Image (cartoon, coloured by chain):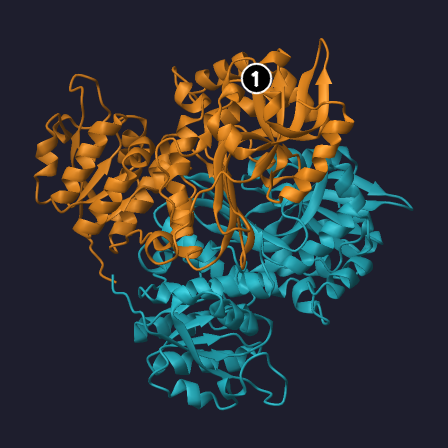
Chain colours: A cyan, B orange
C-alpha cells in the first residue's frame, strides 16, 4: 500500500460543510494536509479564513498541478458535476459531499472513475459521519445482504420525533427544526423525500450494484403526515420513520423505496430520534447490524470528508464490488405491501386498487384504513401522494407471496367491502 | 492498490468458528479463496469436510510456500501465538480470531508486524461481526475520541438481559445462556469479565494507542450481580450492562476499565440486549456514533474473518495510527467514580474508602449504598470483588473534579456517616 503523504487540497465551497472541514483540518495536524486554495462564488462575503486562500476562479484550482485532491462541497449540483468531472479528467482525486449531484450523475461518475482510474469518495453524502458506504463496500463485500433499512434524513426525522414525543403539529415541528438549523428555509427537498431519495439512489449501488434510473424508485416524504397518523401510530405502539428500504426478495430481485413507515417502539429504527440517522443491515452471515450517528451538521459532515481525504493517502477507491464483481441486483415492483392510509375524505382513496382491507375506521374523528396493495399500483398512480391522503407502510410491510394475499382477500369480503 | 487474487488459505482450528468460515467461503465464490489445508488437533473427530483437507501437522501449513494466509481460530492461546508468529516469520499474512492470544501477546504481535511488514488482522476477536477495529483504525483515525463505551461480551449481556427483563435469577439466566450456546460450560472467562478485558486490551490500542500491561486495567464481571441489584436498577429506570469503557479526561489522560454499570433505559447501551454487542463512540467531529450487532456465534464471527481475508487481497494492514503517528494515550486511575454497592453484610464494605455517600439503604430486604470513591482505591483493593458484595457504576460514573467531590462530602457528614 503506497502512502502518499503530500495531500494538497483545493476546496470548492466554504459554507457550513466547507468551513467545518477547514476548521477540522486545522485541528488534526497528523493528517498533514494543506489547503492550497478555496474557490467560492461570492468574494465579498466575510470568511473565517485568510483572504489569500480564496479565489472565484475555478481553473486556478482545476489547472494547478500541485493540487492532487479536489474537495467539492457546493450546493449547485450541475456546477458540482462540472467541477468533479473536470478535476478527474485533470488527474485529480475527488472527495464530494454533494448527494444530489452524485445521485443525478451516477452513471457518468461511474464511467469517469473507470476511465481515469482515479478515486471519487463521497462518504459525507450519505448519513454524514456514519461510515455506511465504506462498510458496505469493504465489510459486507462478500456477505449476502438480505435487507437494508435506514433513516437517512435528519430534518424529517426531527419533525416526526417531535410529532410523536411532544405531540407537536407538523407545522410547529417543522418550525422548530428550521429554528435549530435541522431544516432549510425551503424544506421541500427534505420534507418531500427528495434528499432521502438521492442518498438511497447511490447507496443501492454500493449495497446491491443497482443504478436506479430517474423515476424508477417509489418515494414520498412526510409532507402529508398529520396528527391523526401520529395518534393511530401511538395506539399501535409505533412511531413513524421516513424509511429508506431495500430488500432482496425470494425471487432474487430487489424491492427498494423511500416511504414513511410505522415502526414498533422496540425496533432499531425507532431508536433513531431527532436529527440522528441510522442504518440497519441484515445479512446472511453478520446477521443484523446497526450503525447510528449524526447524519448532518457541519462537524459530522466534515468528519466524513476528513476520513475520505485521509483514505486517499493510501489510494483508497470504491470498487463497486456488487456492480462489477458480483451479479448486479435488479429492481422489481412485483410484490405487495401492507399500508395504512389516512384520509380526510374517502373519495381521495383509490379503494379499487387494494387487494384486501384489514382495518377500517371512518367517522368524524378518525379516518383510515389498513390494507394490502400491489406495489406496482403505488408506482403507477399518485393518489396516495396527494393532499388529504397520508400513506404509511406498516411495520412489516412486504408481502411476497400471493397466496397469503388471496387468503386475506376473504377478509375484504367478510368486511362487506368489495370495491 | 495491488490486487492479489490468489488467496491460498491454511486454517488452524475447525471448531464453531473454523467450520463457519469454511462454510461461508463455500458460499462466496466471488472471494476466489482456496482453503488448501486445515490443521486440527484431533484427527478422529468427524468433520463436515473432505478428509484430505485435514492434517495434524502444523508445519505442513506453516512451511507451504503456496499458502499465503494463515487463518488462526484455535482456543489455546499459547499454541495460537506460536502459530501466528511462525507464520509471520515465514512470510505469511495472518487472520486471527483469538482475543485472548492477542491481548496476552500484544507487544510481541506489534513488534512482529513491524519487523515483517506483514499484516495481522483480527476483527473477529472483538465484537465478531461489528467492524469496530477497522472503523477505529480507518474512520476515526484523525478524529478526537472523547470516549468509547461498549458491551463486548454476549454471554454476560444475555444473563443480565434475562435478569432484568424476565426477572430470572442469575443462576437460571446462566443456565439458559448455556443451553442456548451463548455461554461456555465453564463460564468463568465470560462471567468474571476476563473475555471483555481481553477485548478491551487491544481495542484501547486502536482507539488511544495504549498498550495496557497485565493487571493495569481495573475490571470485574457480573459474578456477584444479584436480584437485589436488578431490582434497585429497575427502580432507578436502569438496567445493568457489563461496560467496557474508556474516556479521555480533561488532563489528557485516559480512564479505562471493564465494570458493571447502571445505564438508563434510553441509553444506547441499554438497547443492546441478549447476546448482542454494541459500541458507542463519542468524538469531537463525528459526535456520537453507535455500532451494534451480533458479537458471537459461528456465522457472525466467520463474517468478520471473511472480511479480513477479503481485505488482504488489497494488502490491507492495521496502521495503529494512534500508537505510531499520534501522541500515545496514557492510562490513569486518578479520578473518582460514583458507584452503587450492594452487600449482604455491612462488614464487607470498606466504608472508609468512600469520599461521600449519597444514598444508603440497609434493612432486612435491601442493602446498598451509592457513593463516590477514588478510582485508585478500586485499583488497589479487591473487597468490592468478593462474595457478598456487588459493585455497579452509576449511569454517569466519572467525576473528574475534586471540588465537586468535596462539596458532596458534606452530604456524608449530614447523613451522619463519617467513616
Report the number of numbered marks. 1
Q: Position of residue A47 (x, y in %)?
A: 60, 81
Which residue is located at x 52 percent, y 25 percent?
B158
Residue sitting at x 33%, y 35% = B103
In the image, is residue B51 above or below residue B84?
above
**Farthest residue in the top direction?**
B364
Asked whether the viewer can see residue A109, the reply is yes
- The N terminus of chain A: image quadrant: bottom left
Q: Position of residue A399 (x, y in %)?
A: 57, 41
Q: Check the image and name the residue furthest to the right.
A: A364
Question: For mark 1, does the 10 Å Cα neighbourhood hold few (<14), some (14 to 19), or many (20 or more) residues?
Answer: many
Q: Where is A303 relative to B135, above or below?
A: below
Please name whichever residue, B86 or A170, is drawn nearer the observer in this view of the structure. Answer: B86
In this rendering, the answer to whether A267 lies above or below A129 is: above
Q: Determine which quarter of the picture holds residue B389.
A: top right
Q: Where is residue A353 in the image (x, y as percent from the top left)?
A: 69, 51
Q: Residue B170 or B308: which is nearer the viewer?
A: B170
Residue A417 visible in the displayed image? no
A42 with respect to B302 (left or right):
right
Name the residue nearer the viewer: B262 or A114. Answer: B262
Nearer the observer, A254 or B344: B344
Q: In this view, does A31 lie to the left or right of A225?
A: left
Residue A195 location, quadrant = bottom right
Q: In which quarter of the image is residue B87?
A: top left
Residue A264 picture location, percent across and down: 66, 38
Dot 1 falls on which chain? Answer: B
| Residue that carries the numbered disc 1 in the rendered image | B389
Find numbered disc 1 in the image and state the secondary structure of the residue it sits on.
Answer: strand
Vertical position of residue B232 compared to residue B301: above or below: above
Amino acid at each position: 500500500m503506497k502512502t502518499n503523504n503530500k495531500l494538497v487540497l483545493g476546496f470548492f465551497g466554504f459554507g457550513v460543510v466547507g468551513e467545518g472541514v477547514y476548521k477540522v483540518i486545522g485541528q488534526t495536524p497528523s493528517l498533514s494536509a494543506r489547503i492550497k486554495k478555496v474557490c467560492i462564488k461570492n468574494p465579498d462575503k466575510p470568511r473565517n479564513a485568510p483572504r489569500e486562500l480564496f479565489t472565484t476562479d475555478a481553473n486556478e484550482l482545476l489547472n494547478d498541478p500541485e493540487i492532487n485532491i479536489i474537495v467539492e462541497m457546493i450546493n449547485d449540483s450541475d456546477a458540482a458535476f462540472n467541477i468533479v468531472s473536470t478535476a478527474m479528467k485533470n488527474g485529480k482525486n475527488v472527495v464530494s459531499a454533494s448527494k444530489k449531484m452524485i445521485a443525478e450523475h451516477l452513471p457518468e461518475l461511474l464511467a469517469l472513475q473507470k476511465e481515469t482510474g482515479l478515486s471519487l469518495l463521497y462518504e459525507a453524502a450519505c448519513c454524514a459521519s456514519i461510515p455506511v458506504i465504506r462498510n458496505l463496500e469493504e465489510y459486507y463485500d462478500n456477505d449476502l445482504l438480505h435487507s437494508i433499512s435506514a433513516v437517512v434524513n435528519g430534518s424529517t426525522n426531527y419533525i416526526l420525533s417531535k410529532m410523536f414525543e411532544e405531540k407537536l403539529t407538523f407545522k410547529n415541528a417543522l418550525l422548530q427544526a428550521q429554528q435549530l438549523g435541522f431544516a432549510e428555509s425551503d424544506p421541500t427537498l427534505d420534507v418531500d423525500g427528495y434528499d432521502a431519495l438521492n442518498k438511497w439512489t447511490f447507496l443501492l449501488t454500493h449495497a446491491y450494484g443497482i443504478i436506479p434510473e430517474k423515476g424508477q424508485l417509489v418515494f414520498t416524504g412526510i409532507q402529508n403526515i398529520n396528527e391523526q397518523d401520529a395518534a393511530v401510530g401511538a395506539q399501535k405502539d409505533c412511531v413513524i420513520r421516513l424509511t429508506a428500504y431495500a430488500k432482496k426478495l425470494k425471487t432474487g430481485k430487489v424491492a427498494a423505496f423511500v416511504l414513511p413507515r410505522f415502526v414498533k417502539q422496540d425496533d432499531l429504527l425507532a431508536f433513531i430520534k431527532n436529527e440522528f440517522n441510522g442504518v440497519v443491515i441484515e445479512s446472511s452471515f453478520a446477521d443484523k447490524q446497526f450503525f447510528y450517528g449524526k447524519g448532518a451538521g457541519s462537524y459530522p459532515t466534515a468528519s466524513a470528508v476528513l476520513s475520505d481525504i485521509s483514505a486517499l493517502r493510501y489510494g483508497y477507491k470504491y470498487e463497486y464490488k456488487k456492480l462489477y464483481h458480483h451479479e448486479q441486483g435488479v429492481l422489481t415492483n412485483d410484490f405487495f405491501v401492507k399500508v395504512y392510509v389516512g384520509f380526510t375524505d374517502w373519495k381521495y382513496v383509490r379503494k379499487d386498487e387494494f387487494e384486501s382491507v384489514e382495518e377500517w375506521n371512518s367517522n368524524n374523528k378518525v379516518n383510515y384504513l389498513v390494507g394490502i396493495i400491489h406495489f406496482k399500483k403505488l408506482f403507477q398512480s399518485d393518489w396516495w401522494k396527494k393532499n388529504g391522503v397520508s400513506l404509511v407502510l406498516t411495520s412489516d410491510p412486504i408481502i411476497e407471496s400471493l397466496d397469503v394475499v388471496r387468503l386475506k382477500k376473504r377478509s375484504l369480503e367478510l368486511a362487506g367491502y368489495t370495491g
